[in-house]
Image: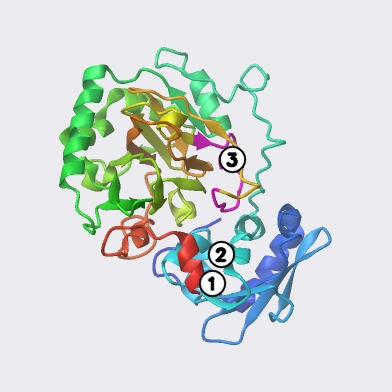
Amino acid sequence: MTIAAAGSPTIDFDEFHRTELPARLSSGNGALAVQDVERIGPLAIRLAGTDRSYTYEPAGATIAVEPGDAGARVVIELDGESFTGLALDLDTLPGLLYRGKVAAVRGNVRRALRWEAALRSMYHGLPIFDPEHADLRGLDGEPLDPTETYSLADDAAMPAHFLHTMGYVVVKNVFADDEVAAMLGAAQRLRDEAVEGDHRSWWGKNAGGESLLTRVLDAGREPVLRGLYDDRRLLQMAAWSDFELVPRGRGRDDAVTVLWKLPGMVEGLADIPWHRDCGMGGHASGCPRLIATVCLTDGSAAAGELRVLPGSWTGSVNFMKPDDPDAPHGVGLATTAGDVSLHYSDSMHASLPPTGAGPFRISALISFVRPDARVHRGGERTYNDPLLHNDDGQVEHLDKIVDRL
């Protein structure tokens, strides 16, 4: 669909619910969404500053849209700009919660979050992803092995097809030991310079209350890391994508991130549950986005692995807490120092806590985006900016935000 330009009028709340959305639902979008929310109960959205609201209610084989909110189990309130962002797939409910744009009128907002995948199906026709029935086949027509890895010497058609089908790919032995050592040295300098509350880093706390660095967001200050955007091997891998993608912010300090996995973290975003990288917003204006993760140490489960849900980049999956009994198992990416994994930002993935005694995973991340990719919110450089509103650099868990509503 056409994306609204910056400064364009907001979507008419009533016209959308009376005319546009019912048409989309009757064309098939309702059937895509209904089974996912039958057990959750009706959701209503109210336009802030008015008494106008509409309820989304599972009704047989579709979703019914009814004026008012008397029958809804949960009612949330959004202003016109926020609803427009949601309706255009520019904003998400978690992102709007972090921005303080969601008000709780009635019921538990966690129930509204559980509608996230269904809303994307209703508004945009994106199917709910079903990992049990995903058709993930290779060029030979046989099911792909989700743990398959490749090298730069392989025929490019093989890793390119794997990436397109699964939404991720692992490439072994890309960087030599001396190159990894140089990047680790740069990471250590960044670690030594980071300060809580500098708005250039993420921090978390362990069970003992110790505040620890988990991520530096402007690692491009280090030349060896900034140079990753010009590395012929990474450019070769980015070219496996079916999309026209260019380096994101080449030359900018904030175009490179370094993360550290640490054991026993209980606060902050050291360990990130199942999510998509556009989960804070920007899907329609920035995706597809291809993230390259350069592993600088062990990347196994013992070190704090990255897990991916194969094929999930083609559909919608709900926001999930790490202890959700319905959370997928996914596939751990078997990386070691010098390997590179690629994944599309739409893919559901999780950065899990280490299970061993160390050393723990350290990775450098860069990304490739469409030439016209942009952040639609004025004053923000990335959709993760609202995560840094705390003076101490601690990223607040979404549960705490919901509990305050």
Q: Is residue 23 above or below residue 206?
A: below
Q: Answer yes or no: is residue 128 visible.
A: yes
Q: Answer yes or no: is residue 276 visible.
A: no
| Crowding at mark 2 (Cα within 10 Å: few <14, some 14-19, many 20+) | many
The local secondary structure at tag 1 comes to loop
Is 398 positioned to the left or the right of 120 in the image?
left
Q: Amino acid at mark 3?
A: Ser
**What residue sits right under mark 2 in the picture?**
87
**What residue sits right under mark 1 in the picture?**
11
Q: Nearer the viewer, mark 2 or mark 1?
A: 2
The residue lying at 58 percent from left, 34 percent from top is 310
Residue 319 part of the magenta segment: yes
Which stretch appears magenta? 307-322
Is 120 positioned to the left or the right of 158 in the image?
right
Q: Amino acid at mark 2?
A: Ala
**What residue sits right under mark 3 in the picture?**
312
Alpha-carbon span between mark 3 and mark 2: 21 Å
What secondary structure do most residues of the magenta stretch adopt? loop
Residue 118 location, x and y as percent? 66, 57
Numbered circle sitting on residue 358: none
Alpha-carbon span between mark 1 and mark 3: 29 Å
